[in-house]
Amino acid sequence: MKTPRPQAQVSRRTFLGQLSAAAALAMAPRESRALDSPPPAKKFGVALVGLGTYSTDRLAPALRDTKHCRLTGVVTGSRSKGEKWARDYGFPEDNIYGYETMERMAGNPDIDFVYVVTPNGLHAEHCIAAAKAGKHVICEKPMANTVAECDAIIAACHAAGVRLTVGYRLHYEPHHAELARLAREKVFGAFTRMKGENGFEMGTEDAHSDAWRVSKKLAGGGPLMDMGVYVIQAVCMAKVEAAPVAVTAKFGPVTRPKLFSEVEESVTWTMEYADGAQGKCLATYADAVSRFRADAERGWAQLEDPAFYYDDPVLTTSRGKVHLPNVNHQVAQLDGMAEELIAGRPSIAPGEMGRRDVAIIEAIYAAANSGQRVEVKA
Ligand code: NAD
């Protein structure tokens, strides 16, 4: 069984070299402080690329509440929209960039992280531009449409000496972290049977605002890319971040052929592990469903519906309900990633993990298209 390669660690020297002198001074005492200590004088500057729904409704508001980060810039196709964001979030208009001018961020000490929140098919182009500007990169899920694009992003970040993480918010969420611990410490034994489902019902009104989500070029695929990646993540988490050895898969019925002419409406798949464990999964744009369960020899763990949405998850095990704090997922993720960088720790959601998941997705599509069992080369 393979685990994702740890992310190339950015040395403290390289990291400090990328900050302004003032910022470096502010950083210096931070290293010895506990991670729950008061916020540092300097917060990391984050620029959001793509000001759509997720940036507007979740990430930007979260950046008002983060301890270690703040919104200091945007990349947008609309200058006037950028100007409104600059006023609302209090950053200079000089920090508004277009998709074609991202390289100019290189000389801007206000921006430490670039967070790419555009359609999946544009992630590679925008992540590579951010890396070339010398900025740490956070890439939304799924990391890209293909493994080849993931490799290009990883290579660009490596060449630039910047950190690459994927916007896997649930890795920083306490209930999912507890599931990971139960798996890692084999509290109930190794999980051997997993079942996960995730989807929403895409209506005609969504089809307009979500047009890119049903475009093969921009989305890379249908609900597997968008919702299925959470189920893949949960299964891998239950298997201590190991990739499956093989998958089988089947596309579901197409009930709205006009809407789903380029991508699947739903897909079921099975992830097979070297130890005989299996994950049975569903991703769909035809039904609102979001749950996960993992069974082991001596017990089980279950994330109740909705397991993967922004709502507070409920984790139940064979021992009863698990009581954990509820957190804002985006605040927890952004501060978690900042703390990893401050401490010089490898990320728990590195680019290599994003690549692993895209490799699994490619295998699932190959299996669904061929009807054959397909080995996963993650
Ligand atoms: P959205 O359609 O609301 O926003 C997309 C943004 O990209 C818009 O600002 C749009 O103007 C911009 N864009 C730039 N070039 C474009 C082009 N050629 N075509 C279409 N739009 C273009 O989408 P969203 O829901 O904000 O999703 C964006 C990314 O964030 C996706 O990768 C998605 O998977 C991810 N996402 C993650 C989560 C999460 O919980 N982690 C939640 C929602 C979305």
Image (cartoon, rainbow, N blue to C red):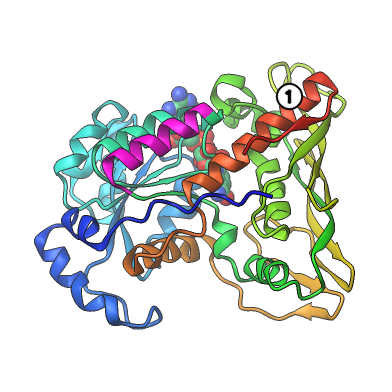
Q: Is residue 152 magenta?
A: yes
Residue at figure coordinates x 47%, y 45% from the top left: 351
Q: What span is in magenta?
A: 148-162
Which quarter of the image is occupied by the C terminus?
Answer: top right
Residue at figure coordinates x 56%, y 50% from the top left: 4
Circle 1: residue type: Ala
Whole-percent x, y for residue 337 in the image: 42, 61
Whole-percent x, y for residue 129 in the image: 31, 33
Judge from the rendering whether residue 283 lies leftward or rightward of residue 7; answer left or right: right
Magenta region's main secondary structure?
helix
Instruction: Answer with the quarter of the image where residue 321 lies.
Output: bottom right
Let me know if residue 50 appears in the view: no
**Taking 72 as reference, is 77 above or below it?**
above
Whole-percent x, y for residue 187 in the image: 77, 76
**Taking 192 as reference, is 365 above or below it?**
above
Residue at figure coordinates x 89%, y 68% from the top left: 297
Can you identify the residue that label 1 sits on?
366
Whole-percent x, y for residue 281 in the image: 81, 44
**Taking 187 as reference, is 266 above or below it?**
above
Instruction: Answer with the quarter of the image where residue 157 lies.
Output: top left
Instruction: Answer with the quarter of the image where residue 183 lies.
Output: bottom right
